Image (tube, rainbow, N blue to C red):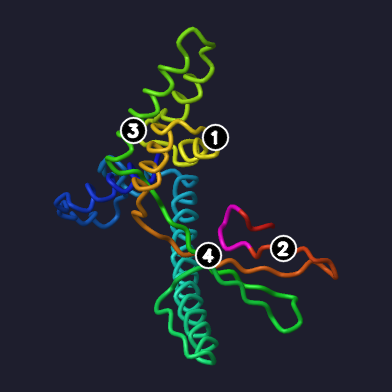
Amino acid sequence: MSNSTTSAQQAAVAAAPAKPVIPTPEGYWKDAKGKLTHESLVRPIDKERDKLVKELFNSSLAVSACLAEFKKRAFGDIEAFVALSLEQYQVDIGGKKGNVTLYSYDGKYKIIRAIQDSVKFDERILAAKELIYQCVTEWTEGARPEAKAIIDHAFKTDNDGNLSVSRILSLRKLDIKDPRWIQAMDAISESLQVVSSKAYVRVYERIGETDMYRQVPLDLAAVSL
């Protein structure tokens, strides 16, 4: 499932009117379908499972709050330090701009702040596509069909109808002098728009005396036990 689909579903859920919460009568347990069962009829294993899930859920809220606080502090402190460092040169870039790598004095630790842009094509990509197909149609008359297959693959959309930015941009590496192709490449460049940006903080520790660094995992999937 794509991020855009997930976001749309979350927005729909948030916009839906909240259902009134009916308290569970004392001495009863309510299941996921709303069915009430007297606690004496709830199996011990079901009670233990319920206890475990709720304990882990509450613990996860505390961990999530710690990560949120760390993220807030990290971005704020890095931004403040960069501003302090640039004051020496009387430069103010304003806000979180660009990627930054900071090292401890002994080089044992490093912090990376990375800004990742999300880019998409606007309507001008349609003009680029038409110009490219005009070229390909003319070039492949009586020739092998591989060239058209390459273009078809570049403009293939995913399940959400989105074009692959990397595949289309790879067409610009082709050294083709046809004026229509050059115009199409210009249209591709001009149609590329930054629609959003995400900032990340990554923490690393040097591995022994090598030049390699090990990332400190800040997500559950990457944490070693």
Residue interval drawn in magenta: 217-221
Say which residue appears at 49% left-offset and 51% top-offset.
48
Mark 3, Cα crowd under 10 Å, few <14 / some 14-19 / many 20+, is: few
Q: Quadrant of the N terminus?
A: top left
The furthest residue to the top: 142
Distance, label 4 to label 3, CA atoms, is 28 Å
Disc 1 crowd rating (10 Å Cα; few below 14, some 14-19, many 20+) is few
- Of tags 4 and 1, the one toward the viewer is 1
The residue singled out by tag 4 in the image is 114
Discs 1/3, front: 1
**Which marked residue is nearer to the observer: mark 1 or mark 2?**
1
Crowd band around label 4 with a 10 angstrom C-alpha radius: few (<14), some (14–19), many (20+): some
Locate residue 200, reporting x and y percent: 50, 64
Residue designated by label 2: 214
Our reading of the magenta stretch's main secondary structure is loop
Choose the circle earlier in sequence order: 4 or 1.
4
Query: Which dot marks residue 174?
Result: 1
Give the residue type at disc 1.
Answer: Leu
Q: Which residue is mark 3?
A: 161
- Percent coordinates x, y for residue 41 in the rendering: 37, 43
Q: Which secondary structure lies at badge 3?
A: loop
Magenta segment includes 220: yes
- Marks 4/1: CA–CA distance: 30 Å
